[in-house]
Image (cartoon, rainbow, N blue to C red):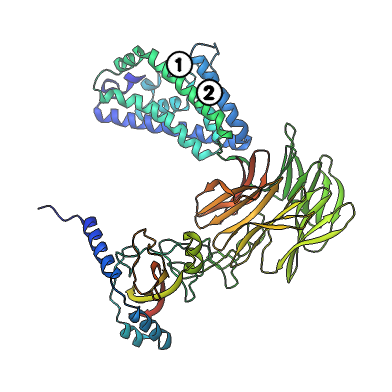
Amino acid sequence: MLETFTPAVCGSRKRQIVAQSLFAAAAVATAAALGLVLGLAGALLGAERAVLAAAALALLAAAREAGLLRVPLPQARRQVPERWRFELPLPVWATGYGAGLGAGVFTFQPVSTFWVACAGALALASPLTGALCLSLYGAGRAFMVVWPRRRADDPTAAVERIVGKRGALVRANVLALLACGLLLAAAPAAGGATRIARDAYDPTFDARVLAYGTQRGEVVVRPPGEPNIVFPDASHPSIDGRYLAYRDSQGIRVVRWRNGTEVRRISTSGATLPALDWPRIAFVRKGDRKNRIVVRDLRTNRSDVEASAGGSVDLGRPSLHRGRLAWRTASRSLTRIFVKRLSTGSRRTVAYSKIALLGNPSVRGRRIAWTEARFGVSRLKLAWGSGSGRTVETVRSRTRSYWTTAIGRGRIYSTRWTFGSGAADLYKTSF
Amino acid sequence: MQPPDASRLDRSAERLAAKLAESTTRRSFLGRVGAAALAVAGGSAVAAAVKPDEADAFHLCGHIWTTGSCPSPNPPHSRIDRKGYPLHPSSGRRVDNLGRFVNASGYPVDAAGNRLRGPDGALLPAAPRTRVCEDWTREQKGLRDLRTQGSWFRCCGGQIRKIVDCCSFSRRRINGDASLVGYCWGGRRVYCIMYYETGLPC
């Protein structure tokens, strides 16, 4: 195909440049469009699963290219249709060739790397990033058309020179695929955040089950290896074992999440933001003059006010686990994160700041996570025992920040949201 | 002939200015007199009394070659109100410590003044809005003795800008080098600077 773009075929030098430009633009645009679609598909599938699938595919491809495995490639064993350049005008066939080669799937593939690139775009789970990354594949296709001309010799001779170095190229390709596979496999455990749900916030985690609220006004429970269970007209979930507490239009409802059977209902005026640690439940009771955090034993119905603050002080979403209650207070002059042991009543200030906005604590055993927002930067913090806390992850943005958190096994689930639009996504970060 | 290196000239001038300021104890007489005049009289008569020079920017207008701005929600524009709380540099509206516009009650609002909502649709609570010198700089730099003290005046954008010193006993200023006596008093030196737009024409 390369000889197509010589003056002999394209006519004048000018027509050759036009043909090459159209080819390059079409190749890059088609590859970018493919990346866009794959990134979108990855976002719909959930990036967590896609990353591991991409890692497995990269390792499989490395083994295939090294000659260890014989795996057939899904491909159309064709070349670009030659008759196009006899029947169609130059702008059309040059663009068509570029689009056909940029898409990757319509022509013969000597190596399996293209499919790994596709899997990588899927794993990115971001349409724009996927488009940007895969457009490099189109740029590579375009480069192979332009490069022989710069060498000012026969394009087919240039290709033959590359074929002569096939052994070295194959080895380099194997190494690249191997590195790609290992990096992708390590990515989920490397501390980088992975988006696990879109338009979602308020994560809660217990016994390998994740639940969260959606911006459509639902609560979703995600048991591992099972279909999601959705509770409509619900928000602010908190899960503990087989029980789920959430807020609905009538107050706080506690259900068995597997079958939706209602176990308890709290209809106290102003009750919101539940935190369940069966049989205890903590919730915020908002009043005109004071906001309170109430802990109620759902078996005995005994309630105790564990924290209170003036009406202008925000208490945020509390967290309760194994008798340890965490919450924050935020006023115009100070924010603080507290942990209280309910059995002894002892209270400790975990963090405080006069300039940052601290909030959204979650407690699990002796660990506590919270968020720290400053102008242009927000951090996910984690402390163990009486430690002062370390930064697990940082978001540097003037428009995006952390919202609510939940600690899981070796990971923190967190909400990231955008100030202007209010859009929120759920992320998972290992620690 | 080679043209002079502008950055080298700048550095030399900065060193010279720092040396001069370090060796001088001006006790901020002019700054305090100027501030008192502004507070009492106001208006164009004061503008004439203060006699500010038209100033060009180095890191902000009115402040050339010397101490850096205090940490604030909109660095390096550490614009403050009369009480030392942060303001948006260009609009002059109140901002909280996250740089969001806030209303008189301290709740975050959009440009039109409507209260902002979180991802759950609920109205956002107020975040801290604290003083740039005594709270921001103190917490970020770990200095417990910071005070807003001296000030001087420049003409910026057609109005008098009051440059305010945030002073400490520290011998190092925010730039990392030796601090200047500047317009601080009581043994303190300039740690970083802020500014207040007086609104008075010049």
Chain under disc 1: A
- Work out whether B115 lies above or below A41: below
Q: CA distance from mark 2 to mark 1?
A: 16 Å
When the figure is inspected, residue B57 is found, relative to residue A105, above or below; the finding is below
- Specify the farthest residue to the left: B1
Crowd rating for badge 2 (residues with CA inside 10 Å; few <14, some 14–19, many 20+): many
Image quadrant assignment for residue A241? top right
Which secondary structure, mark 2?
Answer: helix
Three-letter residue code for mark 2: Ala
Which chain contains the residue that carries disc 2? A
Which tag, 2 or 1, sits closer to the chain's start? 2
Task: Answer left or right for A117 relative to B191.
Answer: right
Q: Where is residue A332 drawn, in percent x and y? A: 59, 67
Identify residue for label 2: A58
Foreground residue among A4 and B35: B35
Tell whether A305 sits left or right of A1. right
Q: Using the image, tell me which numbered label, if any, was put on residue A110.
A: 1
Please tell me which residue lies in front, A287 or B118.
A287
> Left or right: where does residue B111 sit relative to residue A336?
left
